[in-house]
Image (cartoon, rainbow, N blue to C red):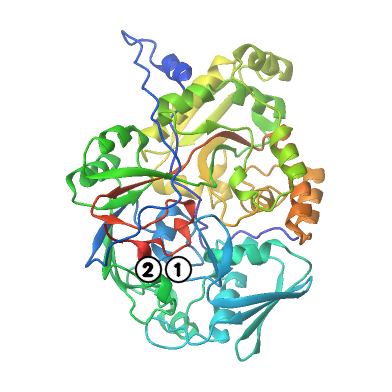
Amino acid sequence: MTAQHPPARRARRRARIAVATGVSALLALTACTAAEPEKPSDVSFELTDATPAPSGDLDSFTWSSYSEPYSLDYAYAFDYSDNQVLANICEPLLRLNPDYSLTPALAESFAHPTPETWVYTIRDGVKFHDGTILTPADVVASFNRHLDPAVGSSWYSVFQNVASVEQTGDHEVTVTMTGPDSQFNLAMGGSAGVVESAASLESIGADYGNSSGGVNCTGPFSLAEWKSGESITLTRFDDYWDKDLAAKSAEVEFIFMTDPNARVNSWKSGEVDGGWMVPLDAIAQLRDSSVGDVYFGMNTAVNNLIVSDTDGPLADPNVRKALLMAIDREGLISAAYQGIGTTTDALTTESVWGGASKAALDTAFGDLEEYPYDLDAAKKLIDEAGVAGEEIVFATAPLGTDFSVIAQTTVAAAQSIGLDARIETMTPSSYTTLFSDPSAREGIDLFYTVWYLSAPDPLEMYSVLRTGEFSNYGNWSDPEFDAIVTEAATIEDPAERSEMTAQAQLIANDQLPWLPLAESPVTMYMSDEITGVAPSINFLYYPWAATIGAR
């Protein structure tokens, strides 16, 4: 595989959600206070596969979003706020279901006649929101944008091995690869597989996907209004092709609410009917409000510290190990997540290893090196590495209390083992550039992300970390790792492929190019007035709002 080129337009980062941190590190920062803060009680929870079926349709419902979408252009939709809206308007060739299985969508079927070709049969009679009919030419135009350097698609990595996208029949599109690539078809259930009207792409031009240009897709809702800085309103598309997933609400309004307290208060008051990514410190009060409930669902995300400079003090893997061992991650789960989650030493969750063999799972998770909280062992590693007193810089932004706490705790952990660490606070927009502009990362050693996977395969995570990949933010490089990941991508059988991916996971676990902190479930609040949605991370790509109706 070739390395991903930097996009001409900003790539979007994966998350704006951060976690708070552990009790011990937090106390190091609050030692001057009179009394030790009381440790919060852990919250009991269980995963929910589905909520009760609706009793009928709705006129409308409201949903909060922690941020306004950067864009509804599928080529740039690379974040939670973008995709939770886009998933209800635009559709990919395949459908990523709540259990992370893939089934037909705009492609009624697909074939893989040779290792280098994927052939998609495009569903007949599907209408765009303007009433025109979906054709293979629309697929070709939509996909070719990912290959255009002038577009600078955030999803270029999915297409980096594509040699051509061509219409090869009245209802057929053939994608030819430069070599075998098992990951391409798996990505067709996400934003990389979205199809837009070729005519609309041409006519809307530079305003495509923004608040003035809009989009014209095939989903169960169409974009009715985008009030910049305020809200997005979607209306039911009555000519939607999949009658089993026709929208049960005539309208849905997404309200942008950057203040987490405002979101929580809007749910408690009944002003807003629901939202994803519930502030965990508000779960108890939401449960006591008697107007709705909090649900927990399957996730594919791991909360990580990204090592963005592998030339400085963190160049030595043992220093990275020391820093991870200096963070009380068990305390993090209890203090910041109220017990909702588990520590992890892997960069993937087991939820994306669905096609794996038992041997692969035993290797990938059973053979992991563990990094327990151990300050004495961490200090010893720092002394042996000879980096005591050297400075590391942790970048953060005022995006929420959790951002501040995770930054403070990481710095306190680093200082507790002999490093000189400081926080550099950036504006939210500047923080976003850390994920897209290498120059923005100059002088930065660490920053935070919650990195979810868009396809049901752990190899997506490890492909990101190959030498030269655009999202390999610290330019970490390991030739053995690169060879394993590149070969694994050529293997079609999921079980066989998983056994090689397991080896890549062990190398990442040993080298720690990113520091895994914890994994936790997807959270969702929903009022007692509505029901029907399945709590799952697939809300980023599946038309989940269409399933919501009256309780």
- In screen coordinates, is 371 left or right of 193? right
**As displayed, is residue 265 above or below residue 337?**
below
Numbered mark located on residue 210 in the image: 2
* Secondary structure at numbered mark 1: loop
- Report x, y in % for residue 267: 24, 46
Identify which residue, 323 or 132, lies in the foreground: 132
**Where is residue 40, by image quadrant?**
top left
* Secondary structure at numbered mark 2: loop
**As displayed, is residue 72 above or below residue 241?**
above
- Report x, y in % for residue 390: 61, 22
Q: Which residue is mark 1?
A: 73
Q: Quadrant of the N terminus?
A: bottom right
Tell me which residue sits at (35%, 33%) in the image: 401
Mark found first going from the N terminus, 2 or 1: 1
Tell me which residue sits at (47%, 19%) in the image: 25
**As displayed, is residue 267 above or below residue 456?**
above
Whether the residues at callouts 2 and 1 have beta carbons within 8 Å, the answer is yes
Q: Amino acid at mark 1?
A: Asp
**Where is residue 159, by image quadrant?**
bottom right
- Mark 2 Cα shell of 10 Å, populated few (<14), some (14-19), many (≥20): some
- In screen coordinates, is 375 left or right of 15? right
Tell me which residue sits at (77%, 72%) in the image: 116
- In screen coordinates, is 10 left or right of 244? right
Residue 427 seen by the camera: yes
Q: Amino acid at mark 2?
A: Asn
- Report x, y in % for residue 322: 64, 22
Tell me which residue sits at (38%, 15%) in the image: 30
**As displayed, is residue 257 above or below residue 21?**
below
- In screen coordinates, is 229 left or right of 469? left
